[in-house]
Image (tube, grey):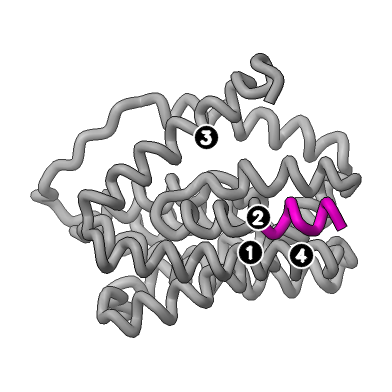
Amino acid sequence: MLIFFILFFVGIIAGFINTLAGGGSTLTLPVLILAGIPSPMANATNRIAILFQNSVAVQRFYKHQKLEIKNIRLITLATIIGSVLGALFAANIKADHFDTILGFVFLIILILMLIPHHRKARNFNLPRQIEFIIFLGVGFYGGFIQAGIGFILLATLNLVEDFDLIRANAAKVFIVMCYTIFSVLIFAFSGKIIWKYGLILALGNMIGAFLGVRAAIQKGEKFVKIIIATAVIIASLKLSGFFELIGL
């Protein structure tokens, strides 16, 4: 019961920051692994929470007219194709190999998050073929690892579209919801998902997503920027091992 409570509570936090920024899976994956789940199965089980979380976020953003699906149909398709390939790869990888790759990926995410980014007005348009290839790669990563995909998608959407942070987050949760449907199916058929943990975590993530969208709509882009900055700092400290160093 204690691990269920921890999963639910962490799910609320993860759902909130995933909806407004990213990095929530860097919190939920260690908790699932702490529960005794091998890392490949933790990676798969986490997708249940991601799917429900983003379904709630999509509905809320759409209700508030912040989601523009027409402009992101092509990149969503590319991301779905990439995610299917990534999930198939993840479903068939050995646990020790996955641990090595996950550690390396987390290191890359940390480096990327520490690099300062400055938003600039776009004065160019990428060819559709290039956009497709970029999001194919983003989708592969999302299907394979998932952790940190929010940061990657926000940065990539900023490259190819002129969204403010609220609309970029709305597009992000829609894309993640779409490709996660296929990831969940692949992991479910491969027997990688532990449903009781995934559904408890999903309940927390859904509440966090609901609160996240409401906060974004009511408080505006400045608030979202604060959440993103906070999420980046926390994720960076987590991935650098700072919390373990101080005994947390």
- Checking the image for residue 198, the label placed there is 4
Q: What is the secondary structure assignment of the residue under circle 3? A: helix
Using the image as rendered, state which of residue 7 and residue 118 is in the foreground.
Answer: 7
Q: What is the secondary structure assignment of the residue under circle 2? A: helix
> How far, Cα to Cα, is label 2 from label 1?
6 Å
Give, as a three-letter code, the residue at label 1.
Gly
> How far, Cα to Cα, is label 3 from label 2?
17 Å
Give, as a three-letter code, the residue at label 4.
Gly
Highlighted magenta segment, given as a residue range: 1-8
The residue tagged 2 is: 9
Q: Are marks 2 and 4 in contact (CB under 8 Å)?
A: no
> Closer to the N terminus: mark 4 or mark 3?
4
The quadrant in which residue 69 appears is: bottom left
- Checking the image for residue 204, the label placed there is 1
Q: Is residue 6 magenta?
A: yes
Q: Residue sitting at 52 percent across and 34 percent down?
A: 235
Q: Residue sitting at 87 percent across and 66 percent down?
A: 190
